[in-house]
Image (spheres, rainbow, N blue to C red):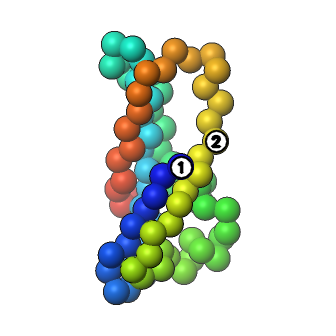
Amino acid sequence: TLSLHDALPISTRWPAMELTLTGPSNAVVVRKVLLPSQYLENPRAQAAGMPPNSEQPIDLLLETSDLNLAGYSVALFYP
């Protein structure tokens, strides 16, 4: 679960996310960019933008059983 926070008094666009999974030696194992259309279930939420002064939980389910992972990072950006 990831929480996105909009502290502005106006709605904002949903950001894209770059998810990086790393192995035990901190080497990158997988890097993937997720667009709002890939992590939001409701298309209306995407069109409306992130509500002002809100915190939105984002749940991502990943199948990683065949990977030797030790860490991750998430970077938000607007393409």
Q: Is residue 60 above or below residue 36?
A: above
Residue on which disc 2 sits: 61
Find residue 45 and report its image quarter. Answer: bottom right
Where residue 11 appears, as percent x and y from the top left, is 42, 82
Where residue 15 appears, as percent x and y from the top left, is 42, 61
Residue shown at 54%/80% (left/top)?
48
Q: Do callouts 1 and 2 mark residues in contact (Cβ within 8 Å)?
A: no
- Kind of element beneath mark 2: loop
Residue shown at 67%/69% (left/top)?
42
Which numbered circle lies on residue 1? 1
Residue type, label 2: Leu
Residue type, label 1: Thr
Q: Quadrant location of the C terminus?
A: bottom left
Residue shown at 64%/21% (left/top)?
65
Image check: 23 left or right of 46? left
Q: Nearer the viewer, residue 41 or 7?
A: 7
Camera-near label (1 vs 2) is 1
Q: Is residue 4 above or below residue 74?
A: below
- Kind of element beneath mark 1: loop
Find residue 22 and report its image quarter. Answer: top left
Q: Nearer the viewer, residue 33 or 60?
A: 60
Upstream in sequence: badge 1 or badge 2: 1
